[in-house]
Image (spheres, rainbow, N blue to C red):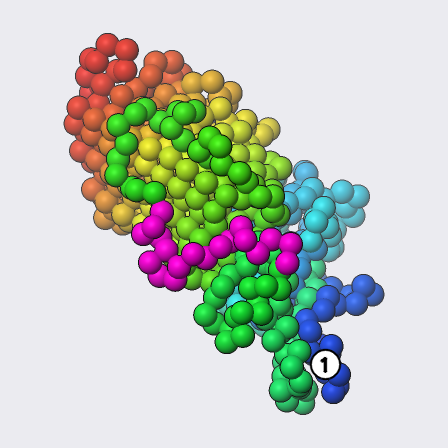
Amino acid sequence: MSSNLNWSGGRRLARRALGATAVAALAVAAAVVAQPAAAAETPQSIWTTTAASKASVDLADASSVELGTAFTATADGVVSGVKFWKTADNKGTHVGSLWTSAGARLSKATFVNETTSGWQTVKFATPVKVTKGASYVASYLAPRGKYAYTQSFTGTSASPSLTIPSTNVGRYAYGTGSFPKSTYKSTNYWVDVLFTPTTTTTAPAPAPTTTAPAPTPTATTAPAPTPTPTATTAPAPTPTPTATTAPAPTPTPTATTAPAPAPTTTPGTAVGTARPGPTTTGVPAGTTLKASGGFTVTTANTVIDGMDISGAVYINAPGVVIKNSRIHGSGSGTGVQTSGSGSVTIFDSEIYGFENAIGFDSWKAYRVNVHSNTGDGVKFGSDVVLQDSWIHDLKPGAGAHADGGQVQYGVVNLVIRHNVIDLSTTSSANAALFIAPDLGGSTNGPVTVDNNYLAGGNYTVFCVDGNNGQYFIGNISFTNNTFGRGAAYGPVRVNVPVTWTNNTWADNGSAITL
């Protein structure tokens, strides 16, 4: 959901802070191939069935809040659902979610047939693949508060495949379903997952079986989440020749044309002269696309070219390039999302049908056509460039307040240059650009917004402090931008120091002043 804050008098307000088993591998070559856990295997969870039985209840807090548990997977696997400990006073419709540590929602589902209290469980329509070593947050929305909690919590995970932070395992965010990032006095809010490992774990005794006969190179297929599309010709596994031929269905789409220099062979990044729109953004006419499902990129400098991707692309490696491709979803998640050391540059592509098209840190997009998302156009983070791109015609879901581009935490090195961000035809549009670091912390920027056409929303540009004066972004500049008419309250609302130069109405060229 794009909005985690309630609109009130032109501002969405942030609330106060609240308080494997290893598989035995005998001397059989096939035994070293990673296999899904048996269908009858009981999913693992972080908390035991009785762990939350003595939790406190915050009866004083009736605000809508997203509550979560942070965890790290120590094995590849799938999360099939979310659980939470319910108190009798925790009423309303609860929605469970799974997020990356960077704040990208991977899946969500609504709890049904709840009991009055105790553990409540919901399963996702499709289990979500998680990666060994990656961190996630499982959460649920408590729309009327009065949730279970344990303050000053210290403990460990009951799952052999999931670990939790030693402190501050619980996360929260006030609002109607935004990423829970904040912590408070090491409080645990008793949220859990259903996790099933999909690869064998390296138990001490069977470890020598990795020296088994020739088939051992098939161990490189272990990362089940990314078999076909991420035909990564990575230098990591020495038998890369066999690894690249393994995904027979689609080896060519991810043609990694060159190692490190590959990104420099892609189209240029010079600022365009034509107005971004249907003829200057998206997949170039005449491009032949090859169909693929969503996937995860784990090899540095991978180049993805000429693909029609149905599903999200997760970027877990640096220097990735996506070009001349179409990426589309079914209304949730983020189309292209980075995490950890991942970084990506996107050229001449179209992204639509997700909750958000691109997020969060370390991405660049040139001549990208973004539309038909149910939340926001893009999520801006640090070390980000959006240039010569077209964001338009979003389709916000129920309760969403769509932003063309959104900043919700302190960022550095953000450039938004020569784009058309037009929400004039988007219902429930909040802002073409929303910059408010409500999730913290404070940074010195810089944030550069230059030579864009901006239109639509309540305020077309909404640039304020975070969490009602707690957080700030410095060195924000708006220069040479033109504005369309029709915003509900006006072209701009700013309550922080910015550089504001030569920003005008598009129809008559008259100056817009603060």
Q: Is residue 264 magenta?
A: yes
- The region drawn magenta spans 248-266
The front one of 150 and 199 is 199
SS label for mark 1: helix
**Residue 1 horizontal side relative to residue 514, left or right:** right
The front one of 422 and 444 is 422
Q: Which residue is located at x 39 percent, y 59 percent?
A: 258
* Residue 218, image x, y percentages: 64, 73
Amino acid carrying label 1: it is: Ala
Find disc 1 in the rendering and name its residue. 29
Q: Is residue 176 visible?
A: no
Q: Is residue 413 visible?
A: yes
* Residue 91, image x, y percentages: 68, 41
**Residue 224 horizontal side relative to residue 111, left or right:** left
Q: Is residue 11 magenta?
A: no
Q: Residues within 10 Å of mark 1 (few under 14, many from 20)?
A: some
Looking at the image, is 206 positioned above or below residue 314? Answer: below
Q: Which residue is located at x 61 percent, y 76 percent?
A: 217
* Residue 256, image x, y percentages: 45, 57
Where is the N terminus found, in terms of image quarters?
A: top right
Where is the C terminus found, in terms of image quarters?
A: top left
* Residue 12, image x, y percentages: 43, 32
**Residue 261 horizontal side relative to residue 57, left or right:** left
How many marks do you count on the picture? 1
Q: Which residue is located at x 44 percent, y 47 percent?
A: 322
The front one of 72 and 283 is 283
